[in-house]
Amino acid sequence: MLARELSDIVFGYGKHGILMPIKPNFDGSGTDESPVLTVGGYFASDQICSDIETEWNSALIDAGMTEADGTVGVFHLATFGGPWCKYGTGAWSIEKRVELIKHLARIVNRSGNHIVSFSVEKSQYQDFVDNTANKPVWGPCFSGCALMAFSFTELTLDQQHLASENVAYAFEKGDRQHELNHAFMEYDANQPGWDNLRSLTFMPKKAALLQAADLIAGKIQEVLMRANDAIHSLDNGLMLTPLNRFKRYYSHDGTTEEIMRHSAMHDCYVANKRHFHTPAHRYLLMIPCRGKFCSREQE
C-alpha cells in the first residue's frame, strides 16, 4: 500500500510519522481561470492514513469504479458524475453519486484526522505580492496558499505537542513541483529547530490519499465559488474568515456538511486582504517561527 511504502521511505523502515496529503483546486472544472484558489488536505498519523487508503479503495471497488483489469479506479471530483468519467458515473442516479461522496467524506473526516485548507481571492493575493519586498518568498498564488497551509499545520502540531514528530507533506507528482519545492525550502529555511523532521514528497495521481485531498479541496472550492458568484467578494474585513461563515453555500445534498462535520477538528479559512495588508504602506506577514506565528512588518 502506498501509505505504508511512503512511511518506510520518508520516516525509515518500520518507523512512523505524520502524513499530510495536499491538493490544489482552482474551480469545479480543474482549470485555473476562476477568481478563487483553494489548497486543501489533511494530516494524520501514518496508521490512520493507511486506514483511509484501505477503506477508500474498498469503497471505490464496491461502487464499481474499477479499471478494465479489475484494479481500483481513481476518483477525481471534477470528472465524477460527468459524461467524460471513464467509470460511467455520469449514468448513475443522483442518489448513488451523492451516497458515494458522503461515504468517501466519512472515510476521510474521522477521529484523529485534521482537515486544513486555505483559499484566497487571486486578485487580492496578486496585489499583495506585487507590492511586497518578500515576493520571492511568497511566490505565485498557489505557493502562497501552500505556505499558509504549512504554517497552520505546524501551529496545530505545536499546540498538540506533536512538533517533534516526523512530518511528510505530500503533493501530486507533477503538480507544480518547482513552485512547491521553492515554497517548502523557503519555509524550511526559517525553521532551524526542525532538524530534518520535515520532508516534501510527491505521489502519483492514483494515490488514494491524494484523491481524498482532492475531494476536500474540491468541495470547499465549490462552496467558495457559489459564495463569490452570489456576493462577489469573500472578504468580510477580517484577516481570516472560517469556511463555516459561508455555510449557506454548502451543497444542499449534504456532501459539504459530511466533510466539514466536527469542524472543531479542522482549520479551513479564506485569507482576506487584511491578512496581507495593514493600513498605509505597511504589510503584516504571518511568518512561521518554530511552529508559531510571528508578526513581521515590512516598510
Image (cartoon, rainbow, N blue to C red):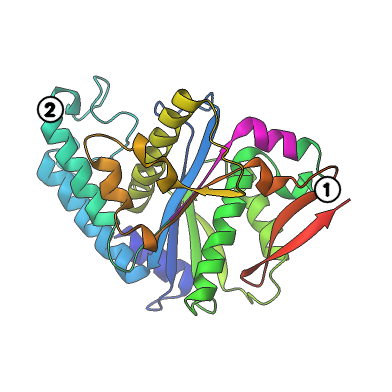
> Amino acid under label 1?
Arg
Whether the residues at callouts 1 and 2 have beta carbons within 8 Å, the answer is no
Q: Which mark is residue 87?
A: none
Residue 33 or 67: which is nearer the viewer? 33
Does residue 272 sit above or below 93 in this rendering? below
Q: Which mark is residue 92?
A: 2
Q: Residue at x 36, y 69 (%)?
A: 46
Residue 69 or 147: which is nearer the viewer? 147
Segment colored magenta: 116-128
Q: Quadrant of the rendered structure where residue 121 is?
A: top right
Mark 1 residue element: loop
Q: Which mark is residue 282?
A: 1
Q: Residue at x 41, y 70 (%)?
A: 8
Residue lying at the far top of the rendered structure: 83
Does residue 285 sit above or below 188 in this rendering? above
> Amino acid under label 2?
Trp
Q: Position of residue 80 (x, y in %)?
A: 26, 31
Residue lying at the far right of the rendered structure: 299
